[in-house]
Amino acid sequence: MSLKSNVEELLDLVANFKLKPFSVVVMPDFFLDRFVSIDLNVADFSKVLAEVVSHKGGAIDGIKQLEVRGGNAANTASALAKLGAKVYAIIVTGKIGLEMLKHYLQPLGVDLSHVKAYGKTSITTALELKYEDEKANVMLRDLGNLEDFGPKNLNDDDFKLLAEADYVCLFNWAGTRKYGTELAKKVFQHVKKHGRGKTYFDTADPSPNKEEIKRLVDEVILSNLVDILSLNENEAIWYGSTICGKEDEKAGSLEEKARVNARLLAKHSNSRIDLHTTKFASTFLKDGIEVSVPTFKVKVLRATGAGDAWNAGNIFADAQGFGHELRLTFANAIAAYYISSPNAEHPTLRDLQEFLEQRQTEKL
């Protein structure tokens, strides 16, 4: 089907929607995120910085900034809760972070009874810069106590929750720097042995912990523990090239390289591979089936958090039994709404309906 046809079908579904209740556990990160929107490319911004530094420091005025809820798990929790899912957060943060979670997530109905509040809150400063016709973000992170989080921090009540959930979603593997692979193995093995739900894995950018990537691939990604592996272009290339031992030199654009590596991952694992990019989203299955849909054309106000919104849409649509094309289109729509929202808001189903109706009046 075309994007136009998918939008029409989604509108019919949303207008007459009856939610199939489902529960989701999200783990393990919350960050205080500060967006710094820089209306320059890297070269021009570097010149501005060099000029300021040459005068032994100074201020750069007129830089738009916004403090919001951050972290893959917390962002995904927000987006899922806005859509009507029952969300449980097993998140590690500090005492200040817990108060912020209560502010951001408790009003949405997210269960915070499993949050681990001790030590230092994780903080990210995201520099959003111009790159070609898009925005790119550079994230400066203080991991706080997320870095040390592992299986030892989970208690019996947490494991009971993992076994009872319909979806168990683990994010930000690189942020759990010391015990991320152990955490993924323990959580997903528990779900497979004692649970009933699907396992969902989005590692985020693995490069900060690149020396551990091969172990992650061998012990988690290729070990039949992951039902759905969600990737962007960079992540697909990292994991695909780890399997084959080198990056494919023949593939052309970044998107094409990502496709090649996503196919490779689908071939060698039993996971459904869901690839989300700025231009399209695709699903790759072990039997060679591949489904792709284009993204929506919107005014991009932010890049950070787009993948989290996309994951929430993907999980929600999967839980509601949408077919591959509609699921991918739904996820793309959730992400498009978020990145074009002036206040970095996630949509309700009603908000999404209005967004899709507006898209109908435009050229898709």
Image (cartoon, rainbow, N blue to C red):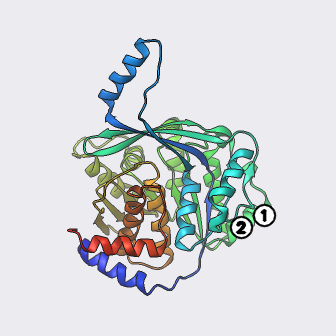
Residue 314 left/right relative to 225: left
Question: x, y percentage for residue 199?
Answer: 56, 64
Element under disc 1:
helix
Give left or right: position of 169 versus 4. Answer: right
Tell me how many marks there are.
2
Question: Which quarter of the image is occupied by the C terminus?
Answer: bottom left
Label 2, residues with CA under 10 Å away: few <14, some 14-19, many ≥20: some
Q: Quadrant of the N terminus?
A: bottom left
Vertical comparison of 307 with 126: above or below: below
Where is residue 5? Give x, y as percent: 26, 78
* Residue at 23% from the left image edge and 69% from the top image edge: 362
> Is disc 1 in contact with disc 2, using a CB cutoff of under 8 Å?
yes
Marking on residue 38? none
Which amino acid does the dot numbered 1 rest on? Asp
Dot 1 alpha-carbon crowd within 10 angstroms: few under 14, some 14 to 19, many 20 or more: few
Residue with the most extreme front position: 62
* Residue beneath disc 2: 161
Q: Name the residue rendered at 36%, 84% in the picture.
A: 12
Q: Amino acid at mark 2?
A: Leu
Q: Residue furthest top?
A: 55
| Percent x, y of residue 274 | 40, 61
Q: Could you tell me how far apart the alpha carbons at marks 1 and 2 are, in whole angstroms?
A: 6 Å
> Residue under circle 1?
157
Horizontal arrangement in the rendering, residue 213 relative to residue 149 (left or right) = left
